[in-house]
Image (cartoon, helix red, strand yellow):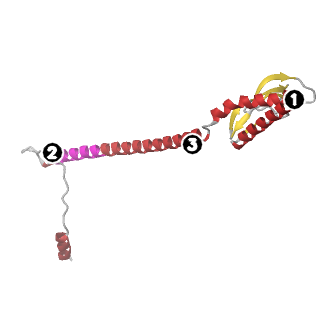
């Protein structure tokens, strides 16, 4: 058996590894001093390896954090760009709302007389067309009358005591509010009960 083990040892190739620098030994150093010096250098090498492993771990952690931060930034940017694209026409719609209001007031305050009947019909036709355009673009009026006051949708311009009405209920609308998808284009200006 011993012969077999010797043959296997001989057959196995040996891998040469870099050994630490040879120990500097003085010619008159005793074996105990040589052993102590070798142990000290070995400990120093181990400390150096531990330090380098720690630095590598720190660098890997920093890399992972930066990669995650970059990924979060990209997601946030993509979401913001999508919102900008989705609500790009909001400013134009906001600018057209006063025209719609004027037409609504004109149709309400127009006295129907024989010669003005065609004018009123024309104004009503324009008003209905604008309403349809807004509806097709997902612009809807905010319901206000007899609704509970909601600061996310309503802008209270006046508080009024009113009999038979619960407190903080909208009792009058000065100016209509409008929503575009889930954004408020313009808050409804309302009178709220005390």
Residue 26 appears in which quarter of the rendering? top left
The nearer-to-camera label among 2 and 1 is 1
Q: Which mark is residue 84?
A: none
Q: Main secondary structure of the magenta part?
A: helix
Given residues 85 and 7, the one toward you in this image is 85
The quarter of the picture where the C terminus appears is top right
List x then y, in percent, for residue 129.
75, 39
Residue 9 spot, x, y in % from top left: 19, 69
Residue 46 magenta-highlighted = yes
Q: Earlier in the sequence, mark 3 or mark 2?
A: 2
Secondary structure beneath dot 2 equals helix
- Residue position for label 1: 115
Residue under label 3, please give it. 82
Residue that lies at the very extreme toward the front in this rendered image: 115
Is 45 covered by the magenta stretch? Answer: yes
Residue 127 or residue 73, whichever sits in front: 127
**Is residue 2 visible to the viewer in this orientation of the structure?**
yes
Q: Which residue is label 2 attached to?
A: 33
| Mark 3 Cα shell of 10 Å, populated few (<14), some (14-19), many (≥20) | few
Which of the two residues, 115 or 34, is positioned nearer the viewer here? 115
Closer to the N terminus: mark 2 or mark 1?
2
Q: CA distance from mark 3 to mark 2?
A: 74 Å
Q: Is residue 154 visible?
A: no
Is 19 positioned to the left or the right of 111 in the image? left
Q: Which segment did they paint magenta?
A: 33-49
Where the N terminus falls, by quadrant? bottom left
Give the CA distance from mark 1 to mark 3.
Answer: 52 Å
Q: CA distance from mark 2 to mark 1?
A: 124 Å
Q: Which of disc 3 and disc 1 is earlier in sequence?
A: 3
Judged from the image, the secondary structure of the residue bearing numbered disc 3 is helix
């Amino acid at each position: 058996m011993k012969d077999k083990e010797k043959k296997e040892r001989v057959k196995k190739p040996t891998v040469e590894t870099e050994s630490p620098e040879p120990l500097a030994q003085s010619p008159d150093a005793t074996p105990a001093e040589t052993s102590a010096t070798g142990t000290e250098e070995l400990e120093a090498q181990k400390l150096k390896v531990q330090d380098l492993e720690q630095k590598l771990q720190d660098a890997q952690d920093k890399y992972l954090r930066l990669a995650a931060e970059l990924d979060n930034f990209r997601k946030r940017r993509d979401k913001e760009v999508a919102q900008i694209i989705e609500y790009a026409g909001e400013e134009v719609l906001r600018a057209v709302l006063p025209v719609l209001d004027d037409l609504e007031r004109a149709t309400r305050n127009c006295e129907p007389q024989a010669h003005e009947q065609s004018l009123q019909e024309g104004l009503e036709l324009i008003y209905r067309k604008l309403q349809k355009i807004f509806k097709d673009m997902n612009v809807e009026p905010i319901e206000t009358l007899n609704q509970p006051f909601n600061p996310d949708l309503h802008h209270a311009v006046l508080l009024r005591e009113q009999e038979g009405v619960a407190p903080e209920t909208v009792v009058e609308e000065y100016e209509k509010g409008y929503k575009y998808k889930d954004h408020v284009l313009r808050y409804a200006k309302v009178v709220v009960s005390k």
